[in-house]
Amino acid sequence: MKKIISELTSQIMHRSKKDNRAFDALFDSISGSLIRNDYDELKISSLIKDRNSGNLFDSDFLEKSHFLKLQDMWRGHETLASAYVQVAARGLGTPNAASGAGELFLLLSSSSVTKPSKGDVSFTNGRGEEEIVELKSGGKISSDSQYRDVNDRVLKVCEKLCVDDSLPTISSKQNYGKKQFLPYNRKCQKFIESLPVESRIMIWRAWWDSQNLGSCLPTLESYTWSEIMWEWMWSVVNTEFKSGITAILIIKRDGSFIVWRSADDAIGYYKSKNEVPSFEFRAAQKNSPAFYVPT
C-alpha cells in the first residue's frame, strides 16, 4: 500500500521519488485521507485507474458552479473527495507551506491538472483552452504593497495639508501608537468627509498610487470610501487577471464553489448579494491591503 501511494505522490509532484521533506509531506497529506476513509490497496488502485482514465475530472467544471459540487466529479469516491476538497496539503510548494483547500483535490483528479508558475492549478478545458486557476477558500485577495508603506504615504499628505492632527488614532494590538488611515473605519470616514474635495483627492491619490494597482485614481463624485471601495476592489482583482489568471475559484466548505472570470464578476457578486466584504489594512505590519472572499 505504501508503494502505490508513493507512486501516486510522485505523479502529482511530476518527478521521481526522492527522499526529501517535500515528498514526505505530500505523501502524508495524501495517505492521511485514504487511511481515514478505509481505503485499502484495492480501493486505491481503483481510484488511480479512474484518475488515469479521466473519470474523476470534468474539464468544464468551472462552467457548472450553479449545480455542481467539486466532490460530485469523483463518482464512486464522493466521501473521499469531500475530505480532499478541504485538505491543506504540505509538499506541493515547500515542505512547510501548506497549499490552499482544493489544490490537492484537483491535482488528484487528473494527471492533466498541473501546477503552473502563476496560479495554483492549470488544465485544458473542453474547448481546448488553457485554464490557469487561482484557488481561494476563506482567504483574501490583496494588492501588491505593504500597508505600512501605504499608510506612511497617506500620513505625509495629511501633514502637507496640515490635517494630520485631525486624523483619528485607531486603537489596535498592531497599532503601536501610530496613526492609521483605515478607510473602512467610521472615524476615518468622518475625517475624509470633513475635508474639501480637493484634499480628499490628494489623500486618496496617495493611497491609490502607493499600491501598484496599474491604474490611476478614477474620477468620482464625492471621493468617499463607499465610492473608492468598489473601484479599489475592482482594480485589485483585475491585477490578478492581467497576470494571466483565467479564473478565480472560491471553494466553500461544502464543496460548492464560485467562479470569477473577471473583476466585473467579483464586484457583481457582492452587489447582487448586497454585501460588503471584510477588509485587512494593518499599518504597523507588512500585510498587504486586502479584502476577504466569500466563505
Image (spheres, rainbow, N blue to C red):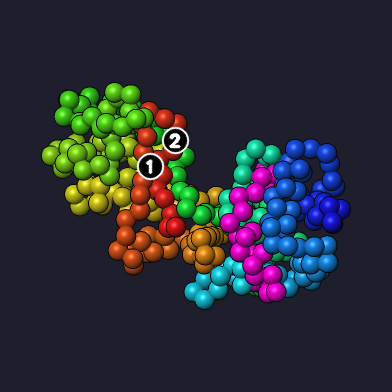
Task: Specify start and end residues of the magenta stretch as a single range.
Answer: 73-93
**Looking at the picture, does residue 122 appear above or below residue 49?**
above
Q: Amino acid at mark 1?
A: Glu
Task: Locate residue 212, reporting x and y percent.
Answer: 43, 39
| Front-most of residues 199 and 25 | 25
Q: Is residue 75 magenta?
A: yes
- Residue occupied by mark 2: 287
Horizontal and vertical percent for residue 43?
Answer: 79, 67
Q: Give residue 104's position: percent from left, percent from top.
A: 66, 55
Q: Is residue 136 visible?
A: yes
Q: Is residue 222 left or right of residue 115?
A: left
Q: Earlier in the sequence, mark 2 or mark 1?
A: 1
Q: Split into 4 quadrants, where in the image is the C terminus?
A: bottom left
Residue found at x 31% / y 32%: 172
Name the amino acid, label 2: Asn
Disc assigned to residue 156:
none
